[in-house]
Image: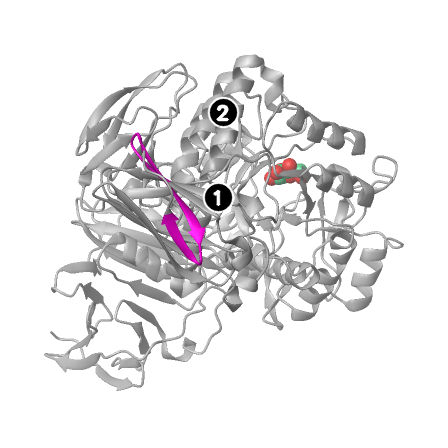
Amino acid sequence: MSEKPLAALKNQNVAEITFADHTRLALQVFSDTIIRVCPIDALANPSYAVVAKPQPTHFTVQVEAGVAAISTAALHVKVYPDHHMDVYDQNDRPLIMDYRGQRQPLNRDLAADETSLLEEEGHAGHEAVNAAAALTLIKQLDPDEVFYGLGDKTGFMNKRGYEYENWNTDDPAPQMENFTRLYKSIPVLYGLRQGRPYGLFFDNPYRSHVDLGKESPDYYAYSVVHGPLNYYIIGGHRLADVVANYAHLTGTVPLPQRWTLGYQHSRYGYQDAPEINQIADDFRQHDLPCDALYFDIDYMHGYRVFTWDSARYPDPEMLITQLHKKGFKAVTIIDPGVKREPGYPIYDDGKKHQVFVKTPAGKDYVNRVWPGHTVYPDFGSTKTRQWWGQCHTALTQIGVDGIWNDMNEPAAFDGPIPDDTVFSDNDKKSTHAKMHNLYGHNMSHATYAALKEQTGRRPFVITRAAYAGTQRYATVWTGDNHSLWAHLQMMIPQLCNLSMSGFSFAGTDLGGFGSDTTPELLTRWIEAGLFSPLFRNHSALGTRRQEPWLFGESTLAIYRKYLRLRYRFIPYLYDLFALAQSTGRPVMRPLVYGFDQDRQVYDIDDEYLIGDALLAAPVVTKGKTSRLVYLPAGQWIDFWTGAVIAGGQEIQTAAPLDTLPLYGQAGTMIPWGPAHDFITDEPDRAMSFKVFGDAASYDHYQDNGYDFAYQKGEFNQYHITFAQGKAAVTLTKAGYPAGLYSRITVTAGDQSFALQLENGKYQRIDKN
Ligand code: GLC
């Protein structure tokens, strides 16, 4: 090697590399499986995403034959004098290897003046983000390498062959696989290279670009317009472990309130208090379980945040009280844009406290959103977050149960916000270019903190824009999809990739937001979305209304069947949320998550797993009443018929319009809750468990479902076993005595066992 030598030394948890050109690189060891890479002088930079602290970890740093070798028990990294880097797994097999060749940009055969010609007809010009980028990483691509993650990007589960951008964007056009960017920037990428999993988390909020083998089959690349290059190499035995490691790095999803797992209904366009009350009554009258109704921007006075239109909503507090009595929670939308209007108290107060982002000349920056000309709260400043949080008392004091944060990319109707607009970054002066992708994150943070303080309950915040780590504050939805079969299909990869990217609590607008739904599409959507963690039907102003009773008796009956079914699964989903919080294992999972050694599942876009126990294979194609289902190795039990099916094969299954093909994995168990019309703060008095196969054991979690008492030990844990025809329940923790089930039933096939609580123990009370 002709390069000048490098030097490497170990300084606490950092391997410090000094190159001959005097640049200095840090490899900061967080654990055996997580190593951060950044310039040494960037080590102390704060991160909005990362919450984990480096753990004391044994690792070695050596220089051999001019090459620095940094090794933990799971990862071996080699750094070369020419700055290249290769990462190997614990068995020295290649994981992430630098590409040493030339980049081969796509040949677009287009002169500059031809771009403007295309634009005149309305075609989007191709933005060469990668060319403008200051810093680039290029890695070798293995012929069989596949990619997942990156949050809510459009397209398929496996991201190989596509390019994406991280620049939060509100584009209402129907999102297709050629969309490079959406509302969120979650730059975590998972790869499987010859079945060996790894993760890369690029923690830099500036605009970045990822090419996953679109330009060339030889490499994949990441580039960002502004430094530092700051990223994490994540290892793990299985893909599931890599995903859990990432979740711990950026924070797991906090346990939500139980009611938030119920069905929720929304529409942009509900007119007034009588209409909202009528919708509530219609749900009950049609025997449709529902837990929440939403107030979209229509409730406000001229779209001014924290106001109500007094003509249409003369007494919002009374309306919310009425909704509560009927078993509905109320969720109100709050957008960031504050109408620029002297005399409007929120604007005046914000101005007084200097909370709005500024032009470089020091004036409030103004663009346009729903209310007309608006100014933007500067959420990167602590003072602004507190001020914004305080504004929410107007809603929490009248009983609002959740806040829906929208338009927080931030959206701007009069063209893009200039890069040099002055935004705060951890209270220091910064730019829009740096803070853009963090705007929704910091807004969610403000909302979460306010709801926690003002209600004492687990905050229910929904956000459209997000960055890595926003899962600590908010659930997300995927924004403005359309009532299109292609968008029903896209729901599964979007939610599964969001799950893998730390966001276990996510949903799409069931039925589709834009365009007009159809009875068949709505039906298949409610089936396919049955386990969508956030389970909300939402539609746009001017589109066909999506209340399920408007499509005739048969659609209504199927819709009801799935809403009722959803409530039986809530205890299972709640268990999975408890697990997601403690272990980082997501609720909704792609098949590759559970079966990463089975190449058959790498490109499955129309099936998903719910925890370890269930596999859903919805029909997502118009007119289909049967489908092929791939069942991974093992045995599977048809949820509807109880038939036992061997896995490791594709089966043909009937799926008439009222049927979601659903399978339980043999050797698992799930709780099966009582039927409910809505969730209350009252604990269930009895619980059932369903066994798939001949034997299984299960740990079930229970708490009051709404506040933080569980963090002080107020929860119950039950260990349920079924083996050799016998069921047993052990109470492994009884910190929430008021909730203890008086009766537990375990069913396995056609056998059923009842147990009753007596003197702190569950005793069999019958035999069938
Ligand atoms: C945006 C949101 C949508 C909402 C609408 C009006 O388009 O994505 O959900 O209904 O704004 O507030």
> Dot 2, how many residues are within 10 Å of its Cα: few (below 14), some (14-19), or many (20+)?
some
> Residue 686 got which mark?
1
377 left or right of 349 in image: left
Secondary structure, mark 1, is: strand
Q: Identify residue type, mark 2.
A: Lys
Where is ligand 1, by quadrant?
Answer: top right
Q: Who is closer to the viewer here, 519 or 705?
A: 705
182 on left or right of 18:
right
Would you place residue 549 above or below residue 5 in this image? above
When the figure is inspected, residue 177 is found, relative to residue 595, above or below; the finding is above
Q: Residue at x 81, y 48 (%)?
A: 307
* Residue occupied by mark 2: 561
Up/down of 350 relative to 589, above or below: below
The magenta segment is 746-763
Mark 1 is on which residue type? Ala
Residue 173 falls in which quadrant of the image? top right
Residue at 67 percent across and 39 percent down: it is: 328
Sequence-wise first label, 2 or 1:
2
Decide if residue 132 is in sight here: no
